Amino acid sequence: MSATISTQGSLPAPLRTGAIWLVGLLALLLLPVVFPKTSVISTVCLMAIAIVFSLSYNMLLGQTGLLSFGHAVYFGLGGFFAAQVLTKVAGENLPVPLLLIPLVGGATGLFFGAILGAISTKRGGTVFAMITLGVAELVAAMAALMTGFFGGEQGVSVDRTKAMALFGLRFGSHAQVYYLILVWCLVCGLCMYYLTRTPFGRLCNAVRDNPMRVAFVGYSPQRIRFLAFTFSGGFAGIAGALSVINFEMAAGTMLDAHQSASVLLMTFIGGVGHFAGPILGAILVTWLQFSLSDLTPAWQLYLGLLFILVVMYLPGGIAQLLEMHLGVVRAGLVARLAVPYLKAVGPFVLISGSCCLAIELAYRLTVEKAKGTVLTIGPVSLNAASGWSWVVLAVLLAAGVAGWRYMRSDFLLAVDDVMNESRKRLMQ
């Protein structure tokens, strides 16, 4: 019966996967036609850049087990060198098309990745993480001092339309830049994907899981870490160059700790154990940065809370959650999840809603006190200075927690039963 469910009436798995990728590619190609608004195209450009950046970071963390706190170094240096080369190309009318400028960022990332990787990758674990943190602070401080190259607080501005035209394209419109970034995102994504399928990619996984055993069979863990670090820096440099082409500017913020923390958030939230995880994380976090920043000034706090919840309750990230439910869908058991999930909606809304309102009230009471302490959402108004508002939120939160504790066991049991049965059906 299970074989009937999995194979009859459906395409073979490779064709199905190819069809999904083809539909996705067509959707991306038609996006500027369907959504000509600049804001939509700009958001997707940022997502594509973030995807390249987070996939490069996943080569370190997800594939090789190296937790870096300074990956923005290669992103930023790649961006600044690309900006300087683009300025030179535009000033002297050199025959270099804009399409090749990301290669400058990639070469810069490779170069500095090799130099700094020779120092950083001698040890793994905490030592490696601390060295990358120190290197990041060192490079950021040097960028602030070397204002001739890095442009100081103003950064380095460029004009991408001054580069040599390619097939008549000057890349003045956002749609043309979108296609350029899309091409580089696809090329980099495919390169990094197939790199994980090579023997080198498998050795990276082995170093992540058990470096002593890798050394025992005759390979050098330090050399494998070094190569992974260098390649990762190269792809991060390409992402930095794409960012410069998109914004027509290289700023000091590309090198700071916030940039390194951002890529860490994207990779963890998406799922470090899956190749698609950083892609999902980059898309979600970029979208949240745009949408939440319009709704609330406390959007960074919500991102931090999301990161904590993922680390605590979903170590495999969104990719793990999707993988579990795709298995349930393939096994034809998704209807059995409807009842437990509907029961969980009430407690989830009460807990998350009361927590969000508490954050907004606290923000009104402290950071945004000048705007007044009254928070109005639709027909409901809450005064942050009134004790009754906090009492109401405490009651709502207590009701949500009590409801969740009451149904938690049955919910987890029902979900586990469905997941286990789906795995059994798919294995038969």
Image (cartoon, helix red, strand yellow):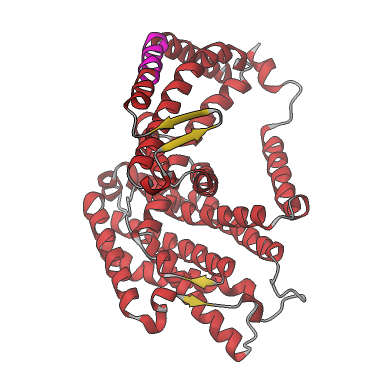
Outermost residue, left side: 127
Quadrant of residue 351 in the image? top left
Residue visible at 41% across and 26% down? 354
- Judging depth in this view, the residue of 165 and 220 nearest the camera is 165
Q: How many marks?
A: 0
Residue 414, given in percent of the width and then of the height, sits at 48, 10
In this rendering, would 325 be left or right of 151? Answer: right
Q: Quadrant of residue 392?
A: top left
Q: Which residues are magenta?
A: 396-408
Q: Is residue 240 left or right of residue 315?
A: right
Q: Is residue 314 visible?
A: no
Q: Is residue 325 above or below residue 168?
A: above
* 397 part of magenta stretch: yes
- Asked if 358 appears above or below 408 in the picture, the reply is below
Where the C terminus falls, by quadrant?
top right
Is 411 covered by the magenta stretch?
A: no
Instruction: Give the residue displayed 56% in from the left and 72% down from the top.
Output: 248
Taking 381 as reference, is 243 above or below it?
Answer: below
Residue 282: x, y in percent?
Answer: 51, 48
Percent coordinates x, y for residue 341 in the rendering: 53, 16
Q: Position of residue 293 (x, y in %)?
A: 50, 48
Residue at x-position 44% and y-position 72%:
108
Considering depth in this image, is 257 or 320 the residue closer to the camera?
257
